[in-house]
Image: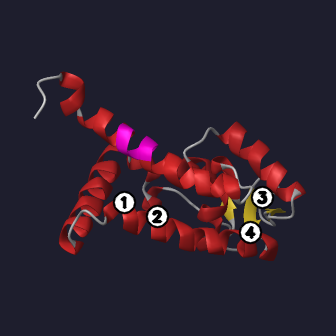
Amino acid sequence: MSEKFIDNYLLFQLALASHTFSEEFYEQLRVEGVSPAKWRILINLVDCPGMYLTALAKYALYEQSRVTKLVDQLVGENLVEKRTSHQDRRRVSVHITKQGLDLVKPLIEQAKIHESGVLSALSKDEQKIIKSILSRLAKRHAKDMQVSSLKLVDTE
């Protein structure tokens, strides 16, 4: 084990791993003509259609103003659509379109393959453990991202 602080600093190790693995996969996205930012928006909407912009920003890990611009671009590409709430016209939910699903579903399969490759050095038990630990740490330190405290979708 290295004596250098940076080599043993958890936040650096997490950032380095995330950057390295993300860049590997983002290269695959770019080949398909999808930016990493658009990917983050679309994958959130696959499992949670009708997300409000505020929730989408939290889960895409971007500022709301950036998400608003990205969503407008995706609307222009017919990959998502925005719907105004019937109860509160100021609230806008975002829904993935069939064209968006057709684009992102094969990419999700590529992401699963990439993830398997990243985790292949670990046993199945170790893979579950690392995901569980990271999830626990994230939930503990990001209470505002917990699903229970955030209305995610328009359920009208």
For badge 2, the amino acid type reads His
Q: Is residue 90 magenta?
A: no
Q: Which residue does the numbered mark 3 point to in the structure image?
A: 88
Q: CA distance from mark 1 to mark 2?
A: 6 Å
Cβ–Cβ below 8 Å for labels 1 and 2? yes
Is residue 47 shown left or right of residue 87? Answer: left
Q: Is residue 102 above or below residue 94?
A: below
| Residue at the top extreme of this rendering | 4
Disc sitting over residue 73 in the figure: none
Q: CA distance from mark 4 to mark 2?
A: 23 Å
Looking at the image, is mark 4 or mark 1 earlier in the sequence? Answer: 4
Looking at the image, is mark 1 or mark 3 earlier in the sequence? Answer: 3
Q: Is residue 2 above or below residue 77?
A: above
Looking at the image, is mark 2 or mark 3 earlier in the sequence? Answer: 3
Is residue 62 shown left or right of residue 14? Answer: right
**Residue name at image x 47 percent, y 70 percent:** 113
Q: Residues within 10 Å of mark 4 (few under 14, many from 20)?
A: many
Cβ–Cβ below 8 Å for labels 4 and 2? no
Q: Quadrant of the N terminus?
A: top left
The rendered magenta stretch, by its main secondary structure, is classed as helix
Residue 145 rendering spot, x and y as whole percentages: 45, 51
Looking at the image, is mark 4 or mark 3 earlier in the sequence? Answer: 3
Q: Which residue does the numbered mark 1 point to in the structure image?
A: 118
Question: In this picture, which residue range is highlighted in magenta?
Answer: 16-20
Cβ–Cβ below 8 Å for labels 4 and 1? no
For badge 1, the amino acid type reads Val
Between marks 4 and 3 in the image, the one whose residue lies nearer the viewer: 4
Q: Is residue 9 above or below residue 56?
A: above
Q: CA distance from mark 4 to mark 1?
A: 28 Å
Q: Residues within 10 Å of mark 2 (few under 14, many from 20)?
A: some
For badge 3, the amino acid type reads Asp
Q: Residues within 10 Å of mark 1 (few under 14, many from 20)?
A: few
